[in-house]
């Protein structure tokens, strides 16, 4: 039996990770999720216990830096969600200092 190579459709290379993050949905308290892979173009999340809206803010922290980015869901499969990067959330007064 020969293996069939499937063409890679992603624009950016994915990195496998197991990193905790939080999803911010409106003004509700942030909900926990797990990033299972990430790239400059999107994320794959493992989510249990709540529905993820079509667009959401993902709060990622690590290495002393926290950032919030907006994502749009492109697929759903069981507890897994794939979402594409939309933009960085800009907070008032969070301008770069230099």
Image (cartoon, rainbow, N blue to C red):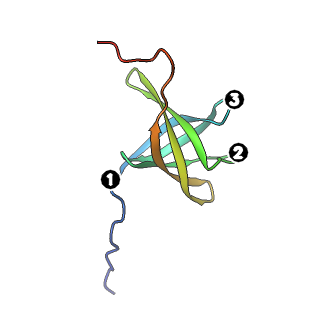
* The image quarter in which residue 55 lies: top right
- Image spot of residue 54 (x, y percent): 62, 50
First in sequence: mark 3 or mark 2? 3
Question: Is the Cβ of the residue at disc 2 closer than 8 Å to that at disc 1?
Answer: no
Which residue carries the number 3 mark?
27
Quadrant where the C terminus lies?
top left
Query: Mark 2: which secondary structure?
Result: loop
- Image spot of residue 7 (x, y percent): 33, 71
Which residue carries the number 1 mark?
12
* Residue at the image point whose x is 33% and y is 57% from the top: 11
Question: Within 10 angstroms of label 2, few (less than 14), some, or many (20 or more) residues?
Answer: few
- Image spot of residue 74 (x, y percent): 53, 57
Which residue carries the number 2 mark?
49
Q: Residue furthest bottom?
A: 1
Q: Is residue 63 above or below residue 23?
A: above
Q: Is residue 97 above or below residue 37?
A: above
Residue 55 lies left or right of residue 44; in this view the side is right
As measured in the structure, the alpha-carbon distance from the residue carrying label 3 to the one carrying label 2 is 18 Å
Question: Is the Cβ of the residue at disc 3 closer than 8 Å to that at disc 2?
Answer: no
First in sequence: mark 2 or mark 1? 1
Query: Mark 3: which secondary structure?
Result: loop
Q: Residue furthest top?
A: 98
Depth order, front residue of 63/87? 87
Question: Within 10 angstroms of label 3, few (less than 14), some, or many (20 or more) residues?
Answer: few
Query: Mark 1: which secondary structure?
Result: loop
Q: Is residue 87 above or below residue 8?
A: above
């Amino acid at each position: 039996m020969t293996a069939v190579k499937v063409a890679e459709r992603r624009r950016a290379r994915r990195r496998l990770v197991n990193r905790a993050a939080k999803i911010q949905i409106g003004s509700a308290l942030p909900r926990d999720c797990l990033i299972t892979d990430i790239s400059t173009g999107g994320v794959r999340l493992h989510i249990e216990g709540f529905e993820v809206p079509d667009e959401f803010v993902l709060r990622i922290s690590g290495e002393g830096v926290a950032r919030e980015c907006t994502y749009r869901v492109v697929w759903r499969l069981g507890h897994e969600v794939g979402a594409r990067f939309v933009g960085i959330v800009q907070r008032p007064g969070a301008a770069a200092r230099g």
